[in-house]
Amino acid sequence: MANSSRFLMIGAHPDDADIRFGGTAIQLVKGGHAVKFVSMSNGDCGHRVLHGKELALRRWKETQKAAAIFGIEEYQVLGHHDCELEATLENRREVIRLIRNFRPDVVLSHRTCDYHADHRACAQLVQDAAYLVMVPQFCPETPIPAVNPIFACVFDSFTDPRPARPDAAVAIDTVYDQKNRALDCHVSQFYEWLAEENGYHGIDFASWSWEDKSAYLTKHWGLRFKVAADAARQTLLETYGDNAGSKVEFAEVFELSPYGRRVPIPEFRQLLLGKA
């Protein structure tokens, strides 16, 4: 068996890691690897009715239910207000400490080109940590790791200033239902706030069958991973072989950052497959 690796996914909100890295996380955990999710904000703005501490507590509970389905070591939600995350010096220190304490082999986050200000701030904070995490006199109370982690970005479909680069792609077809069941835990988002944004007003999702719920989740949050699979088709062919790679329907796709520890692309791919 491959050596056990550690993966830290830092998202801006209490469902970002689930959406962008959930399928890969499930497979890594099943392979004996350690995975931790972090949400930089507490999600206290993501609703039309609820807000503040009440919504933040509800969203924290949703993350813990999802964490049990993913099988991850921890789903940590920090206290920053939704829509107010900034790339400040103190927040930089917080991210540095998070990384040093968990000691991951791979750190993942958003790209800095994104529609949401929180995503961009989160991406900048993680990017800033890629070198500073190894500077011993910065946050000296938290010792530096023995080796700098590899840093990477999760997939998005934005093209300005450039599209995401499909350095690695992980097929998630076999765990797609389990990933959707984890997303299903985020009721406040997928069946209330984001549902209303997608035109589902006054819908009683609780009465829906799992098959209908899963199809709904796939339509609105899963099709991007069909787009990702198509964008990374060549990477999938190289990773899984022509026959298997051509049949992948859903894939989570990752871009290797040049700012952390540098590894060859084949090694990066094997890490995300849990085989390095």
Image (spheres, rainbow, N blue to C red):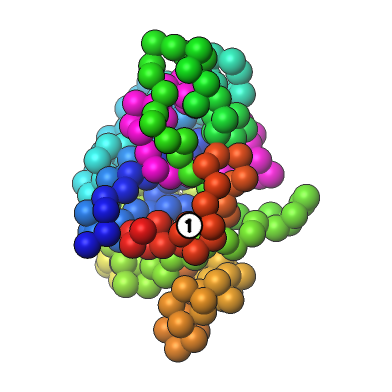
Of residues 21 and 256, which is closer to you in this image? Answer: 256
Which percent across, then down, holds residue 146?
38, 31
Q: Which residues are magenta?
A: 93-122
Describe the element under mark 1 as helix, strand or loop.
helix
- Image quarter where the C terminus lies is bottom left
- Image quarter where the N terminus lies is bottom left
Magenta region includes residue 22: no
Residue at image point 61% right, 70% down? 231
Of residues 128 and 39, which is closer to you in this image? Answer: 128
Question: As displayed, is residue 227 above or below residue 99?
Answer: below
Corner quadrant of residue 147: top left
Q: Is residue 167 left or right of residue 61?
A: right
Which percent across, then down, holds residue 77?
37, 30
Is residue 68 shown to the viewer in this render?
Answer: yes
What residue does disc 1 label?
268
Of residues 198 and 259, which is closer to you in this image? Answer: 259
Which percent across, then down, holds residue 153?
55, 48
Question: As displayed, is residue 261 above or below residue 4?
Answer: above
